[in-house]
Amino acid sequence: MTIELADDERKRSISSIKRYFSEELDMDVGELKAGLLLDFMLKEIAPSVYNGAIADAQAYLRDRLADLEGACAAPEFAYWSSTTVKRGSR
């Protein structure tokens, strides 16, 4: 699976990479090098982050589904059992 960014996200990401290199490493990096680094990170690192996020979402949904029956179930055919108790006590 290839992770792709929209054009605006790509431009903002490249700007962020350039700023990071400038402020944190005192290096000037051009658009081409920043774009190549972004491509590398999207191809090499992003799938691990994506897979972790999917695993977190699956665990969250699994936990919610496990409790779904208890949270949403209503007792079935409970009318007669509640009236039987009342009639028997008369």
Image (tube, helix red, strand yellow):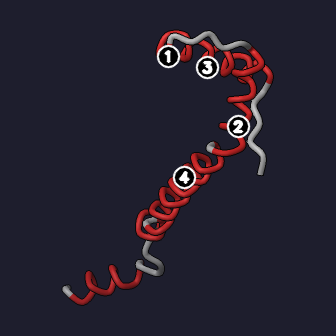
Between discs 2 and 3, the one toward the N terminus: 3
Q: Is residue 3 left or right of residue 20?
A: right
Please give the label number shown on residue 17: 3
Give the distance between the C-alpha atoms of the residues marked 3 and 4, in whole angstroms: 23 Å
Q: Of circles 2 and 4, which is in front?
A: 2
Residue 68, position as x, y percentages in the image: 48, 65
Q: Residue at x 55, y 59 (%)?
A: 58
Task: Tell me the number on the disc at residue 52.
Answer: 4
Residue type for callout 3: Ile
Q: Secondary structure at mark 4?
A: helix
Q: Tell me which label, 2 or 4, sits earlier in the chain.
A: 2
Which residue corresponds to mark 2? 40
- What residue would you read off at disc 1? 25
Are circles 3 and 1 on residues that touch, CB within 8 Å? no
> Contact, CB < 8 Å: mark 1 with mark 2?
no
Marks 4 and 3: in contact by CB < 8 Å?
no
Contact, mark 2 vs mark 4 (Cβ under 8 Å)? no
Circles 4 and 1 in contact, beta carbons < 8 Å: no
Residues at discs 2 and 3 in contact (Cβ within 8 Å): no
